[in-house]
Image (tube, rainbow, N blue to C red):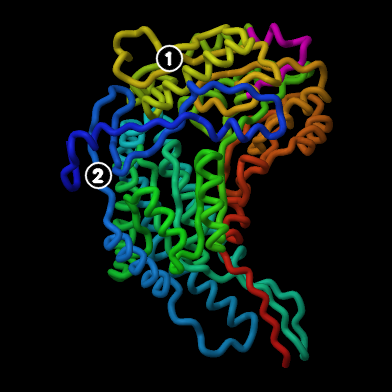
Amino acid sequence: MRSTRALSSKAAKVQKHLVDNVLKNNNCGMNRKFSTNVKLYAPPAHYVSINPATGELMAQFQCQSDKELNEKINKSVAAFKEWNGEFPKHISSTKELTDYINERVDFRTEILMNPLIEVLQQNKEKYAKMMSLEMGKPISQAYAEIDKCCSLIDYYKKNSKQFLAPKVVVENDKIIQQVVNQPLGPILQCAPFNFPFWQVIRFCISSMYVGNSVLIRHNHQVPQTALLIEEAFVKALQKSKASDVLIEGLYQNLFITNEQVSNTISDSRIRGVAFTGSTQVGRIIGEQSGRNLKKHILELGGSDAFIILKDADIDQAIKDAIISRHNNNGQTCISAKRFIVESSIKKQVEERLAEAIKSLKMGDPLDSKNDLGPMARKDLRDKLVDQIKLSLDQGATLLVGGNVPSDEKLKNGFFVEPTLITNVKEDNYAFQNELFGPVTSIIEARDEEHAIELANQSCYGLGGSVYTKDIAKGHSLALRLDVGLSFVNGFVKSAPELPFGGTKDSGYGRECGQEGISEWSNIKTVVIQK
């Protein structure tokens, strides 16, 4: 076991739980039922790396002191200045401004982005294995996550010049009107455990191409992965012989407490905040960012609807449903969670899903033969089991799973059986809340109009899917979903070229695509009278 600074044995065992009182006051105007058995996780004041497949404590890390945090912010400020270079003292035309912007993009590509892709690919096995060890991600999906990170970097390499090019509104012999994207400064990200590489890369690459430096406060669950991400950036900068200022300050990992996060948000040197995680914590981050007038984006929870109409390709819908719901052990904000099925095909869909779910293999995430690994933490497993029981108590019918597995080999890990419940009504806990794990909930709809009504009857608005052979009808229904991402005959997924984000309690702001550049820019109007 590895540690930085000695922790007391008592501190090493701290695992606090809070009763989910927040949800009691967040019913979106709907009739919702709650149980005080459903708990939230309160992160300890230190970082603990536990293998969720075995329950083994692998490493622990003390939080940084306020002095160390202050030094890191100072380094981020210094790196921000060097990352942007010296601004030209004379700009005589839009072309000269464009040339300067293109030079900075080329510099950032050469000094960081190209070598970063190399480092990620060269160390893919090490990085993927650590994700599997720390949060239980199936190893094949961990490899795919590294590849996806590289594809995003490549996307911004190819498109950042276009995205950052000054927009000319008017240019004639009397006046020039321009809109220019300029950097903000050091940006703080609070990153989640479930896609530990992708979520960080997705945020910081677009932000860095604008010209910002970044400070990453990763989830307490994945400290070793957090250090490996920082290592990748350092290795890339060293590979290109970047300056010590950039190596030490452009990308920095933070091990800090919740109180220190609040203090960092209020620090005048920090110019923006990105948060991905639960809606409950997102409200707190949003409030703190707003109070300090900091630019921020929130990517929060989701309870995505997966609508299967009677004219759908059932084979494709079932295949996609299994992938969407069980990817990353069901711990995905955009995975399908509410399966809304027309009455005439409900029994067929129940039988097909039950058969497919029963065939899933659960076990060691490092074994590529397994489809499912464990939940990331014990409290997440316990909470999910409580949620399943509560949903059944409120009238849902259990078809598959519903508990921890009885397999002796899995007893020390944080596993939950892949579960299928049906007859979920609008007032059921599983309808109104996000079940963050491998639980499939079937909801009956009378027809397509009722299906859309049910889909939108949620306080969440991240994503949604519609399955139908009538493409024009599917397109219309997708546009009526009150979400940030709508798919027809496909499950919701993120991609480098598509803006990603939600509405309602799923947050606001967008990552990826050109929008990922704009979010972390000072969109400046420049008017020159000649």
Q: Nearer the viewer, mark 2 or mark 1?
A: 2
Q: Is residue 14 magenta?
A: no
Q: Which is nearer the N-term, disc 2 or disc 1?
A: 2
Residue at 65% x, 16% y is 442
**Magenta portion: prevailing SS class:** helix
Residue drawn at (30%, 66%), measured in percent from left and top? 71
Give the side of residue 387 with respect to residue 79, left or right. Answer: right
Does the segment drawn in magenta span residue 345?
yes
* Marker disc for residue 361: 1
Picture disc at residue 61: 2
Secondary structure under badge 1?
A: loop
**Mark 1, other Cα within 10 Å: few <14 / some 14–19 / many ≥20:** some
For the C terminus, the quadrant is bottom right
Give the residues in magenta: 338-350
Q: Is residue 125 left or right of residue 327?
A: left
Residue 450 x, y percent position in the rendering: 81, 23
